[in-house]
Amino acid sequence: MTGRIWTAAPGGRGQVSSVSAHEANVLRTLHRRTRPFLLHWAAALSLAICAGHAADVWHVLKPGLELASFPAGESSPAGDEVVTVLRVDPSLWDMEILCASQRKDRQKLTTREWCEQESMVAAINAGMYARDASTHVGFLAMDGLRCGRANRYQSVAAFGPRSGDKPGFRMFDLDSGASIKTIRKDYRYVVQNLRLIRRPGDNRWSDQTKIWSEAALGEDDQGRALLIFCRSPYSMHDFDQILLSLPLGLVCAQHLDGGPVAQMYVAAGGREVELVGSYETRMHESDANQTAWPIPNVIGVRPKPK
């Protein structure tokens, strides 16, 4: 009596072999015993390959400052369908909030101009602003300045710890026990914005028809800040899903601004990148904008003093 075993032939084709019943039983026993190991090995190899590919996409500008671009993986009516992320290690880099209201001339600047004039290596929108083109929508505070007022937005980003026992950068969910008053005691820079993703990776947006270019701020599972930009417009529900699908280790995120006003600038390690938004439903339904708009408030990144 013989058994019939399907095996792989050279070149990848299958072939049928005739073996004895005893040989077939031995092969089946061997398969049962080795299959868990093979599956574990295959899974580990797959994770290693993915981790390797994830590491490969990051371009190290300087230690603790890395830039990467990822295909969004979702179609959009405009733009290049690319998500660009600057990853910042807060143990090596300082993050600050810069406001036009602190300048003697009170002049609004593009992120490029903010960087050039304030010796920053990167900058992104600090959040939406009111019709006066100055006041932050939500709560924004730093030493010597308070702009806007607390509202129902549930995400607060904080940096510039007042003591060495606090992380250099941290994002808080106000519905998880944190309070702006307590956060302000621990950090010099505090900014409240509309939440995108709640810790530890919960998309807080439902489906909607509105889409826009997006500038966002996130935190990864190692406590690093993620400055995020995407010119292609998406709904925030879809954008959150895109971010969570990328190899970022993202745990939470907040909306900074959208449409043509959204922007990010990076100049470090011999590379210069200036990104500007365009499309926004019912506001600017076009992909034609190529100009960075002056904005009143930015989050900037600079080297820690030696």
Image (cartoon, helix red, strand yellow):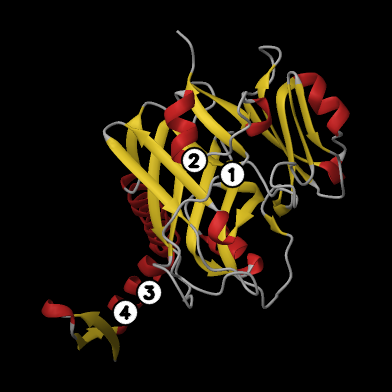
Query: Marks 3 and 2: in contact by CB < 8 Å?
Result: no
Look at mark 1 in the image and give the residue it sits on: 295
Q: Are marks 1 and 3 in contact (CB under 8 Å)?
A: no
Q: CA distance from mark 4 to mark 3?
A: 6 Å
Q: Give the residue number, with chain letter if any, for mark 2.
A: 111
* Residue density around tag 2, few if under 14, some if 14–19, many if 20 or more, within 10 Å: many
Judged from the image, the secondary structure of the residue bearing numbered disc 2 is: helix
Q: Which residue is mark 3?
A: 28
Evaluate if marks 4 and 1 touch, with contact meaning CB atoms under 8 Å apart.
no
For residue 78, side relative to residue 189 (left or right):
left
Q: CA distance from mark 1 to mark 3?
A: 68 Å
Residue 59: % across, % down: 32, 41
Q: At 48% from the left edge and 11% from the top edge, which residue is drawn?
A: 305
Amino acid type, residue under disc 2 in the picture: Thr
Up/down of 241 relative to 229, above or below: below
Residue in view at x 63 percent, y 47 percent: 251
Quarter-wise, where is residue 40 in the image? bottom left
**Residue in the foreground of this view, choosing between 84 and 58:** 84
- Residue 296, relative to residue 121: is it above or below? below
Q: Residue furthest bottom?
A: 1
Q: Position of residue 278 (x, y in %)?
A: 50, 64
Dot 4 corresponds to which residue?
Answer: 24
| Nearer-N-terminus badge (2/3) | 3
Q: CA distance from mark 2 to mark 3?
A: 65 Å
Q: Amino acid at mark 3?
A: Arg
Asked if the residues shown at circle 2 and circle 1 are in contact, with their CB atoms under 8 angstroms apart, the answer is yes
Disc 2 versus disc 3: nearer the observer: 2
Task: Please name which of the two marks, 2 or 4, marks the residue nearer to the observer.
Answer: 2
Q: SS class of the residue under badge 4?
A: helix
Crowding around mark 1 (Cα neighbors within 10 Å: few <14, some 14 to 19, many 20+) is: many
Asked if disc 4 and disc 3 are in contact, CB closer than 8 Å, the reply is yes
Q: CA distance from mark 4 to mark 1?
A: 73 Å
